């Protein structure tokens, strides 16, 4: 039943724990190390989730704007000009911008929300928690995805 | 990429699949200039981060499992994340290559994707390339991408459904095997996106065959979910509602997938709203519902507080009605031949009598959009003012609930718990409680042990 391979790994992980514990009694987290450049898998997963929710709202807002054009073709919505400026001149959605909205809606939803957001949030949260590890195998390389996706998504 | 919204010529507009030549020639349309460049830069960064993340997930699952956590004792969530990460590591480099060649075509005058192009009566110098090559490269990533999105959602749903049904997941091994089979098959079906590119009809038949094969492991998963729910003591939490919603979308989106995967049928409805309806239900709504199920279920684990249940139910019911309200009518638009990506639905006489369906879809999408504000409020309010959570609010077996509610570096104070059993001992006959955590040794549950467990 027992897989000895797992036990060997456990022993290794265990040595690592003590080093880890000692290390972290000494220092206190600053705002930057705790929230921005965190290497803790729980904080990284929260960053991913909040980013994904924000991005999902952006992409959903885009879809609502182009749905307005598709459902009410030919009607004018003067308030559009307040949201998207000259792309919505006289309350009509610019055809070129319509294509852009469709494109960016798809890209954000598929790649940033459903790939980055979904895997990023729950892989980071649950893999260490459910396999029984102190953290991810490499703290800094999980930090990079969340950091870079934050950057490029902005 | 988001910056591109603010530049003069506007963001990339060639569709999310960025097919050349539209995406390869800066002069093709306004968005193909700066907007496309920014799109490519952000995608390269995204791919790098996805690869690093994927390697890290695989390394952690393989190397850092606690004592007793053999592969066949892993919760299905972890199996799903592991397989997803493997898929990502194998397929994202192909998109990277596709994007790189596109950058060469755009900036350095190469002709990987371009040949015999005339603009304003003048021939461009490019020759010998093929835009179809891009489609092959893109969809070699593109189809696994569907499962990169879907498998984690299914994994989360497996966990939520088993826990809230208070029943062991039906067919654990079948679930693992079907995920592996789906992952393997997803690499040999990309051609079903390209039936209209003039491919050899024989090749179309091959891709139809491999595509329809995927229906088998998918159906195994669906039947296992239904068998788990069958006669269960169902706890209808918001997370459970969303997980069941996912199963519903997976069925209704999967059925239209059988139609689209068949080249003879697909040719008639290619690039219509039927396709839009199909992938929004099976990939969009399913994955989003899996994500909602995950958020509602693990919110206490993430933030130490509970989300409001009533708001969760309201959010669920409006969303599920809105999703079907938006995407179900789209099937009929597609069958009537309305093409996707068109700016104006009223430009053609024959589509005029479909306009009321389009209006319905738009109204439903607005309702669905408003419902997400309920979720956002619930999420951010509960983060700070929600009811404090107990240690194990759902009576779950997996070991993340044995760690303290407050987050620590290193997750567990003292030793990491040892695992003695699989994650699905719910309602075991003869057991004291209706769940036995993975950390309970068989020696403490003499009354409920099955033959061979000691
Ligand atoms: Cu596909």
Image (cartoon, helix red, strand yellow):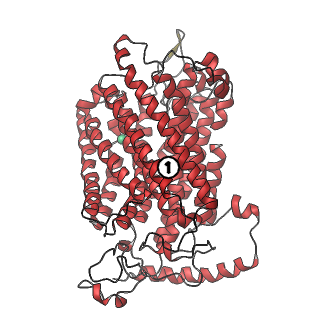
Image: B142 above or below B295: above
* Res. A135 in view: yes
The answer to whether mark 1 is within 8 Å of ligand 1 is: no
Q: Position of residue B405 (x, y in %)?
A: 57, 73
Residue extending farthest front? B310
Taking depth in this image into account, of B133 and B182 the one nearest to the observer is B182
Taking depth in this image into account, of B81 and B194 the one nearest to the observer is B81
Q: How crowded is mark 1: few (under 14 residues within 10 Å), some or many (20 or more)?
A: many
Q: Where is residue B137 in the image (x, y as percent from the top left)?
A: 44, 39
Q: Give the quadrant of ligand 1.
A: top left
The residue beneath circle 1 is A115
Image: B151 above or below B40: below
Image: A26 above or below B183: below
Residue at point 61% right, 29% down?
B11
Residue at point 42% right, 72% down?
B396
Provide the secondary structure element on which disc 1 rests: helix
Left or right placement of residue B329 versus residue A22 in this view? left
Left or right placement of residue B278 versus residue A73 in this view? left
Residue at point 43% right, 65% down?
B78
Query: Quadrant of the image for the N terminus of chain A?
Result: bottom left
* Res. B101 in view: no
């Amino acid at each position: 039943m027992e897989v000895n391979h797992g036990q060997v790994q456990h022993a290794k992980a265990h040595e690592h724990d003590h080093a880890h514990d000692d290390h972290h009694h000494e220092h206190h987290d600053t705002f930057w190390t705790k929230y921005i450049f965190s290497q803790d898998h729980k904080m990284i997963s929260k960053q991913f989730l909040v980013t994904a929710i924000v991005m999902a709202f952006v992409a959903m807002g885009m879809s609502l704007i182009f749905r307005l054009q598709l459902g009410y073709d030919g009607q004018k919505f003067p308030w559009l000009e307040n949201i998207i400026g000259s792309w919505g001149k006289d309350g009509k959605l610019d055809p070129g911008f319509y294509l852009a909205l469709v494109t960016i809606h798809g890209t954000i939803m598929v790649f940033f929300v459903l790939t980055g957001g979904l895997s990023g949030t729950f892989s980071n949260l649950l893999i260490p928690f459910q396999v029984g590890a102190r953290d991810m195998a490499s703290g800094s390389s999980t930090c990079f995805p969340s950091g870079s996706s934050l950057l490029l998504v902005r | 990429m988001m910056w591109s919204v603010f530049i003069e010529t506007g963001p990339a507009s060639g569709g999310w699949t960025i097919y050349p030549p539209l995406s390869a020639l800066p002069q093709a349309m306004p968005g193909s200039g700066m907007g496309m460049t920014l799109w490519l830069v952000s995608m390269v960064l995204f791919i790098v981060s996805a690869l690093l993340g994927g390697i890290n997930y695989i390394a952690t699952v393989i190397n850092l499992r606690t004592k007793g956590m053999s592969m066949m004792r892993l919760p299905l969530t972890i199996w799903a994340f592991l397989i997803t990460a493997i898929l990502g590591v194998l397929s994202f480099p192909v998109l990277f290559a596709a994007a790189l060649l596109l950058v060469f075509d755009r900036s350095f005058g190469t002709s990987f994707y371009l040949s015999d192009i005339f603009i304003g009566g003048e021939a461009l110098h490019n020759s010998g390339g093929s835009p179809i090559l891009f489609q092959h490269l893109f969809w070699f990533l593109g189809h696994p991408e569907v499962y990169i999105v879907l498998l984690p959602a299914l994994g989360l749903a497996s966990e939520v459904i088993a826990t809230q049904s208070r029943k062991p997941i039906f067919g654990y091994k079948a679930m693992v095997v079907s995920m592996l089979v789906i992952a393997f098959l997803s690499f040999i079906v990309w051609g079903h996106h390209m039936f209209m590119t003039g491919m050899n009809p024989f090749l179309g038949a091959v891709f139809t065959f491999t595509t329809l094969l995927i229906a088998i492991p998918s159906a195994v998963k669906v039947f296992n979910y239904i068998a788990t729910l069958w006669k269960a003591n169902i706890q209808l939490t918001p997370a459970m509602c969303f997980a069941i919603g996912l199963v519903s979308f997976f069925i209704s989106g999967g059925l239209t997938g059988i139609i689209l995967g068949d080249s003879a049928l697909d040719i008639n409805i290619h690039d219509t709203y039927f396709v839009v309806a199909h992938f929004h239900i099976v990939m969009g709504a399913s994955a989003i519902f899996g994500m909602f199920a995950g958020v509602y279920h693990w919110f206490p684990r993430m933030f130490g507080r509970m989300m409001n249940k009533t708001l969760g139910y309201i959010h669920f019911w409006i969303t599920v009605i809105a999703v079907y309200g938006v995407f179900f009518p789209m099937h009929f638009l597609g069958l009537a031949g309305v093409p996707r990506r068109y700016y104006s639905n009223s430009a053609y006489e024959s589509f005029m009598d479909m306009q009321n369906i389009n209006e319905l879809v738009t109204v439903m999408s607005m309702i669905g959009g408003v419902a997400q504000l309920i979720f956002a409020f619930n999420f951010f309010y509960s983060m700070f003012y929600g009811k404090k959570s107990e240690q194990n609010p759902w009576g779950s077996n997996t070991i993340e609930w044995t760690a303290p509610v407050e987050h620590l570096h290193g997750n567990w104070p003292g030793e990491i718990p040892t695992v003695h059993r699989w994650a699905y001992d719910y309602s075991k006959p003869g057991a004291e409680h209706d769940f036995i955590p993975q950390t309970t040794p068989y020696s403490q549950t003499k009354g409920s042990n099955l033959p061979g467990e000691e």
